[in-house]
Amino acid sequence: MWAPVESKWQRAWRSFAHRHEITFLLVFSVILLVLDRSGAEFFQRGKFWLTDAFAPAVALTVRAGEASDALWFATQNHFSLLKRNEELSAQNSRLLKWRTRARDLERRLAYYEDLLDVVAIPDSSYLTARALGESGGPFEQAVILQAGRQDGVEYGLGVVNAQGLVGRIIGVGDKTSRVLLLTDFNSRIPVLMESGGAHAIVTGDNSNLLRLEYLPEGEKVAPGDLVVTSGDGNSLPAGLPVGEVIDVSDDTPVVLPYMQANRLEWVRILIQAAQHDIPEGDVSAAADAAVQNADATVQNNVQQASAREETLPQ
């Protein structure tokens, strides 16, 4: 195939241009900068003409980049939603199993309570209140709540949040109240060790931890044991989560409360169900009625046992 023959001067120019192409580019760039700084009219017109000419292409490139980013984020979001949906489906399946289990246990509990003729414990209603801020000084750990006497708050009521017991009401105004936190030095809460059933008292020391005192002699506790309210004295309902034992190296075990004082925002005040007290003059009559009811129950149980024995085969 025939190829054009370069002359001596063409070869020399091409070699010179190849060796000095960077120099040419630098010189051209310097010339452009000088013209731009000088404000030459023809140069400014040329620059705007080039800008107008390439503006559609630049805009198209930008839109393509934005579309690509949107597609990338949409794809990531899609797969994230798929993964989250799988997690929620698995969680829903577990919750359905627990709901079935809870209903079964609820039916069993109702059956056994009816079988044993257990006296029902009055239910407690809840009043949700907002924690407005800390109260007192450096030697008192208390919080002001946006609920008071007008809302049914009374002295001594328990206060809980999503984690567990927060404290007890120690002051009530018309629209606000004050709750003494578990961790306050003056706090004393009767508790129960959920594992062994031993009764004790948790006390605060103005730190973030609690102390487990007045344990029965010889009672052993271990890290991880759960502590709940015992209900002694009818001051608080039984079974409210208090904390977890974290240290038993000392004579007084240390409990980490579930409640975190620095994260209190919304709490629930336990409004106890109304208790119907017996008038003082009717105490003897009530006692006589209770004895008569007990005698009737015993006689009824004896008659039922005799009837079952008669139906047995000889």
Image (spheres, rainbow, N blue to C red):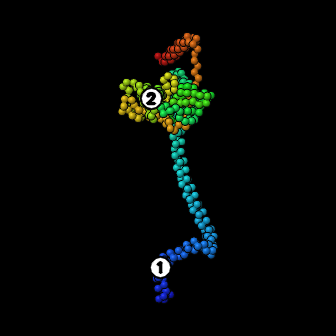
Q: Amino acid at mark 1?
A: His
Looking at the picture, does residue 120 appear above or below residue 299?
below
Label 1, label 2: how many angstroms apart (C-alpha)?
87 Å
Residue corresponding to mark 1: 20
Looking at the picture, does residue 86 appear above or below residue 304?
below
Mark 1, mark 2: which one is toward the viewer?
1
- Under circle 2, the secondary element is strand
Q: Horizontal and vertical percent for residue 102?
A: 52, 33
Total marks drawn?
2
Q: Horizontal and vertical percent for residue 311?
A: 51, 17
Q: Where on the picture, by quarter, is residue 173?
A: top right
Q: Horizontal and vertical percent for residue 254?
A: 41, 32
The residue located at (36%, 31%) in the rendering is: 250
Residue 33 appearing in the image: yes
The residue located at (62%, 75%) in the rendering is: 42
Left or right: residue 60 versus residue 7 is: right
Q: Nearer the viewer, residue 290 or 313?
A: 290
Q: Which mark is residue 203?
A: 2
Q: Nearer the viewer, residue 199 or 31?
A: 31
Categorize mark 1 by other alpha carbons within 10 Å: few (<14), some (14-19), many (20+): few
Categorize mark 2 by other alpha carbons within 10 Å: few (<14), some (14-19), many (20+): many
Left or right: residue 248 versus residue 267 is: left
- Under circle 1, the secondary element is loop
Q: Where on the picture, by quarter, is residue 132?
A: top right
The residue located at (62%, 68%) in the rendering is: 55
Left or right: residue 15 versus residue 127 is: left
Q: Horizontal and vertical percent for residue 179?
A: 53, 30
Q: Which mark is residue 71?
A: none
Residue 268 appearing in the image: no
Q: Amino acid at mark 2?
A: Thr
**Label 1 vs 2, first from the N-terminus:** 1
Check the image and name the residue furthest to the front: 38
